[in-house]
Amino acid sequence: MNQVEKKHPDPERANTRRKQVLDAAESCFSRRGFHGASMAEISKAAGMSAGHIYNYFDSKDAIIAAFVMKNTERVSNLMQDLAQREDPLQSVIDNAGEHVLESLDPKTWVMPLEIFAEASRNPVIAEMLRCADVRSRQQLLAIIRDARIKRGLPAGEEMLEGRLNAMIAMYQGLPVRLVHNPDVKVEPLIAGFRIVLTALLLSE
């Protein structure tokens, strides 16, 4: 894996500059795709010279790695919050609307689709996603297992793994569904999600 972050004498300024690059890269990737956007174009959008961007990221793969790490941290924070809820299983069901709307927002799904597409042909990116998924999935599996045990429900690992993968696939598939059906009715969709999530999380 390429080095994502390089050491700088002024960490705060370096972090600001990295954020500039990531914001510029997101905009460029969204408009032109991963392969259509060059490092020179990204550096220009970030307000840097063509060579200056390499002080922060040595390749587009490294930029993608930073996006993957950022999302992993975001998901980890969500998991920590979920674990603190009195009833995590019910919270997942109750918050379905919020998460469905987030998954349907182009601001959140354009970059993931670019990364997924690149991972299908780039083993380095694919490995990044696999590692991130293992970490996030293990966190969520532990929360669901403990919450089901607390309710007196079966909590076999193989069964829960299957249900968890089904739940994740539902959310990950929403952007693709929106591409195919941009006029999807959101409220019935959310209602459908709640029905399925209730079956996956609360049934024996």
Image: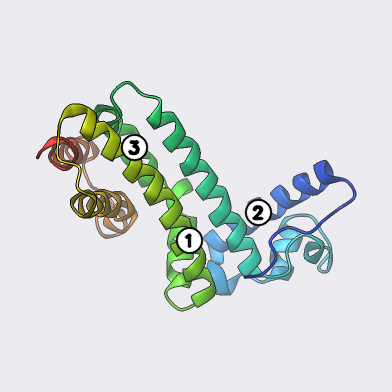
68 and 175: which one is in front?
68
Mark toward the start of the polypeptide (1 vs 3): 1
Going by the numbered disc 3, the residue's amino acid type is Ile
Mark toward the start of the polypeptide (2 vs 1): 2
Residue at the disc numbered 2:
22
147 and 54: which one is in front?
147
Going by the numbered disc 2, the residue's amino acid type is Leu
| Label 1: element kind | helix
Residue 204: percent from left, percent from top:
9, 40
99 and 44: which one is in front?
99
Residue at the disc numbered 1:
131
Q: Is residue 67 above or below residue 151?
A: below
- Measured in 3D between alpha carbons, the distance from the residue under mark 2 to the one under mark 3, in whole angstroms, is 32 Å
Query: Residue at point 73% right, 52% down?
Result: 18
Are circles 1 and 3 on residues that touch, CB within 8 Å? no
Are circles 2 and 1 on residues that touch, CB within 8 Å? no
Which of labels 2 and 3 is toward the front? 3
Residue at the disc numbered 3:
143
Left or right: residue 33 compared with residue 40: left
Going by the numbered disc 1, the residue's amino acid type is Cys
